[in-house]
Amino acid sequence: MNSVRASRYLFVCTANINRSPTAAAWAEHHLAQRFVSADIRSAGVAAWQGAEASAYAIDVIREHGIDLRDHRSQPISLELVQWADHIVVMEPRHAERIVELVPQSTTKIIGLWSYLQQAMEWVPDPHQQSIEVFRNSCRDIGEAVSRLIQEHLAARRAARLARGTQ
C-alpha cells in the first residue's frame, strides 16, 4: 500500500491579515469540495504574531460560507519555508523575501497573480479600502486559488497515472 503525504501549501502576503489568510481559506474550501487532504498555512513577510484577520476579510469570505474568525497572523520563518511543498505568494517582493531567507526555496514559489483572470503583476492588496474592494479581492483570490488547485490536482493525477498507480 502506498503512503502519500498530503501536500503542504503556504500562502504568503505582507501582514497575513487579508490576502494570504483569504487564499488559504479558499484552498481549504476548494480541496475539501474535491475530498482532497492537504496541509494549509499562511504567513506574512511583515506580520506580527497573533493578529486577527481584518474585519472586512472576515465579513466578505463569510458571504461564501467560509469562516476566518479563528485566523491568527504569523511571520514567515525558516521553519515554515522548509515545511512547505508549495509557497504561494501575492507579490514578487514576497518571493524575494522568502529567497533571502531560504535561497533554495525558489522551486517552491508560485505567484498567485499568474492565476488571476486578468493579467496582473501581483495580487492587489485591499488593505484599508472599501468593503466592495474586499469583495472583489476575495472573489478574485478564490477564483485564482481554484485554478491553482485544479492545475496541481491534474499534475498529481498525471504523475500517478505515469507511475501506473491510482
Image (cartoon, grey):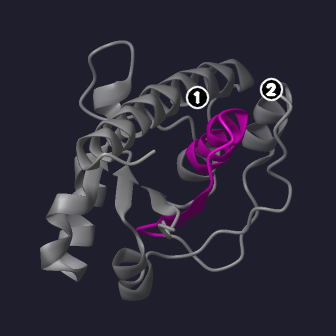
CB within 8 Å, label 1 to label 2: yes
Which residue is found at the position 59% from the left and 43% from the top?
A: 27
Disc number for residue 27: none
Estimate the x, y position of residue 97 in percent, counting from the top left.
Answer: 25, 68
Residue underneath mark 2: 64
Which residue is found at the position 71% from the left and 33% from the top?
A: 33
Q: Residues within 10 Å of mark 2 (few under 14, many from 20)?
A: few
Which residue is found at the position 42% from the left and 78% from the top?
A: 83
Query: What secondary structure is found at the residue carrying circle 1?
Result: helix
Residue 160, compared with residue 108, is above or below; it is above
Estimate the x, y position of residue 55 in percent, counting from the top left.
Answer: 80, 45
Disc number for residue 142: 1
Estimate the x, y position of residue 39 in percent, counting from the top left.
Answer: 58, 63
Q: Is residue 70 magenta?
A: no
Q: Is residue 37 magenta?
A: yes
What's the amino acid at mark 1?
Answer: Gly
Residue 118, compared with residue 144, is above or below; it is above
Residue nearer the viewer, 149 or 76: 149
Residue 98, image quadrant: bottom left
What's the amino acid at mark 2?
Answer: His
Estimate the x, y position of residue 53 in percent, counting from the top left.
Answer: 73, 55
Quick one: which residue is furthest to the top in this view?
118
Residue nearer the viewer, 13 or 155: 155
Residue 12, image quadrant: bottom left
Extent of the magenta region: 23-46
